[in-house]
């Protein structure tokens, strides 16, 4: 994912998510995640969900995808989860593309993920992150229902050494949100002479977009 941040797009997604999630009487994670996905202009948003899971975060991702014109895909393990997810998303007036199956079976068909959200309460969350076919331009990964000692998640994801962890942070919102920003693939990152690269920040005065340009 290109390092381009749009405060305007993030703000609009945040506000729309607040309105869409009034039905669920919850706030915090959904609005934050929606603003992040929209602000980073995510083009392929992927989440994992199973029966009985909370839905506001999914609503926020759908709202963000509407603002970016991107694709929002939800991976569910079975048809019961698919039916419940569809029904509850419909209550909020949004929808997403749903793929039924385990991570091993469906990840090969989702190439170029630049924003992904998994649930730390699911036993397969780390495996889903490892199997993700991330964008060559980088990606933002989120683990909800996490705890402040879950940094091992990112060490596991980066085990093969093809990517660099730009930054990670634990946010005490909801029941804990672990976030990581991964760099572009090593091949892309090293396409210019390493050690002499410098990022320049440029703010578009009309749109408010923030661009980071490598010299």
Image (spheres, rainbow, N blue to C red):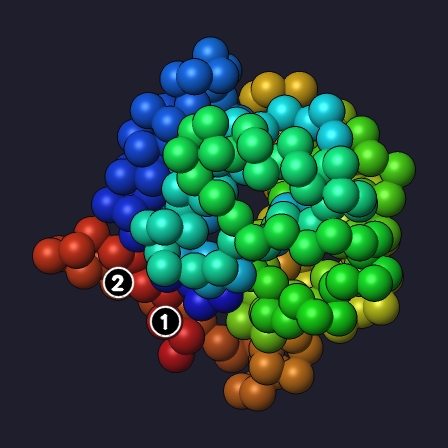
Q: Residue at x 82, y 35 (%)?
A: 122
Q: Position of residue 181 (x, y in %)?
A: 59, 53
Q: Specify the label residue 205 is tagged with.
A: none
Q: Position of residue 29 (x, y in %)?
A: 53, 27
Q: Can you say whether 101 is above or below 18 in the image? A: below
Q: Residue furthest top?
A: 25
Direction from residue 49 to residue 22 in the image, left or right: left
Q: Position of residue 129 (x, y in %)?
A: 76, 53
**Discs 1, 2 touching: Cβ within 8 Å:** yes
Q: For the residue labelled by badge 1, is the local secondary structure a helix, a strand or a loop? A: strand
| Nearer to me, 205 or 14 | 14
Q: Is residue 89 visible?
A: yes
Q: For the residue labelled by badge 2, is the local secondary structure a helix, a strand or a loop? A: strand
| Nearer to me, 135 or 53 | 53
Q: Can you say whether 89 is above or below 183 in the image? A: above
| Nearer to me, 93 or 1 | 93
Q: Is residue 148 visible?
A: no
Q: Position of residue 148 (x, y in %)?
A: 74, 27
Q: Residue at x 72, y 24 (%)?
A: 52
Real-space CA distance between mark 1 and mark 2, rounded to the nearest whole angstrom: 8 Å
Name which quarter of the figure residue 110 lies in.
bottom right
Q: Which residue is mark 2?
A: 202
Decide: few, some or many residues near mark 2? Use Cα within 10 Å; few <14, some 14-19, many ≥20.
Answer: few
Q: Which residue is mark 1?
A: 213
């Amino acid at each position: 994912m290109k390092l381009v941040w749009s405060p305007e797009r993030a703000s609009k997604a945040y506000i729309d998510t607040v309105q869409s999630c009034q039905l669920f009487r919850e706030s915090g994670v959904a609005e934050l995640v929606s603003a992040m996905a929209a602000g980073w202009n995510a083009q392929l948003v992927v989440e994992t969900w199973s029966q009985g899971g909370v839905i506001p975060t999914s609503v926020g991702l759908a709202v963000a995808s509407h603002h970016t014109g991107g694709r929002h895909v939800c991976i569910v393990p079975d048809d019961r989860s698919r039916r419940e997810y569809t029904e509850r998303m419909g209550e909020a007036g949004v929808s997403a593309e749903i793929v039924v199956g385990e991570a091993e079976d469906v990840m090969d068909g989702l190439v170029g993920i630049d924003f992904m959200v998994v649930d730390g309460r699911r036993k397969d969350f780390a495996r889903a992150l490892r199997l993700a076919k991330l964008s060559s331009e980088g990606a933002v990964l989120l683990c909800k229902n996490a705890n402040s000692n879950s940094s091992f998640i990112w060490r596991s994801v980066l085990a093969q050494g093809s990517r660099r962890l730009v930054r990670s942070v634990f946010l005490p919102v909801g029941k804990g949100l672990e976030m990581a920003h991964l760099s572009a693939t090593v091949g892309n990152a090293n396409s210019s002479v390493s050690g002499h690269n410098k990022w320049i920040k440029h703010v578009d005065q009309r749109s408010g977009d923030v661009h980071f340009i490598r010299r």
